[in-house]
Image (tube, rainbow, N blue to C red):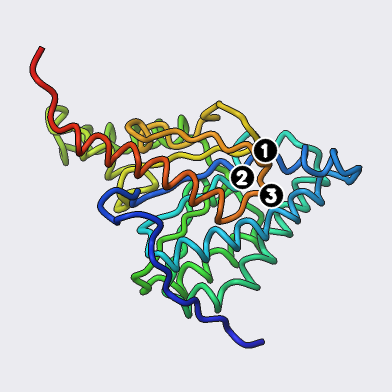
Amino acid sequence: MATTLWPTLEPPAPREFLPRHVAIIMDGNGRWASRRGLVRVRGHEAGVESVRDCVRYSGQTHLKALTLYAFSTENWKRPRTEVTYLMRLLKKYLIEERDELHANGVRLTSIGRVEELPKDVRECLEHVQEHTAGNRGLTLSLALNYGSQDEIRDAARALAGKVARGELSADEIDEAQVAAHLHTAGLPPVDLLIRTAGEQRISNFLLWQASGADFHVAQPCWPDFRRADLIEAMLAYAGRRKGAALAGPREPA
């Protein structure tokens, strides 16, 4: 199969007003399927095309980082058949997209407790990460078996261990130290957090990294979300940034 090389596209607004790091809570797959009289897994299947389109557009416009909430720690509570299908779908995506991501300079990373994923999925994920590790274009991060509270707890334990071993003093623990011990170390803070399907919950996603982010609620369920919806969110973000820049610094109270 021939590998598709993505043409470069002009960003939808001046780059200085656009986000560097966009994160998306991909919600509504089940509702999308139910409204069509389909089983839930068909919604997950349809959502893959949304992932593909948003990743391509992000790469084409040279977005710095895109993080997708693919599987939360809470998702293990779903029916076993649905979880099994989600793992199979993830593996299929990784296999099918590996060469195209690599050819277009995308670096794949993951965040979350990926060591708890099924062995075959974990090995496939590690293979694609290694294959794309040297790329310098878009960084695509898949949040898998991810929960932000767990991530922050893990970082706190790691920092406490360093203090106990004398490698770090408690006074040296600042925001930069915490950020360096999160799964997203090395990535810019999240500028724009999008949630689809009209929901307005953060759902334990990137609580530290998105603390200063703009929150955009998109109405389409994830399988209907496409680059036009991503552009809409980015333009809204750019409009706020441009407005703030034109307003200038606030006068002291």
Q: Position of residue 88 (x, y in %)?
A: 73, 59
- Quadrant showing the C terminus: top left
Q: Give the left or right position of residue 69, taking residue 169 as reference.
A: right
**Residue bearing the label numbered 3:** 224
Mark 2 and mark 1 in contact? Answer it, CB < 8 Å.
yes
**Amino acid type, label 2:** Phe
Gap in angstroms between the C-alphas marked 3 and 2: 19 Å
C-alpha gap between disc 1 and disc 3: 21 Å
- Among all residues in the image, which is located at the extreme right? 37
Between disc 3 and disc 2, the foreground one is: 3
Mark 1 vs 3: CB contact within 8 A: no
| Residue 143 left/right relative to 21 | right
Q: Mark 1 — residue?
A: 75
Give the image location of residue 176, x and y in percent: 21, 40
What label does residue 71 carry, if any? 2
Q: Amino acid at mark 1?
A: Asn
Q: Is residue 224 above or below residue 53?
A: above
- Give me the residue at 51% from left, 81% from top: 5
Residue at 61 percent of width and 67 percent of height: 94
- Occupied quadrant, residue 14: bottom left
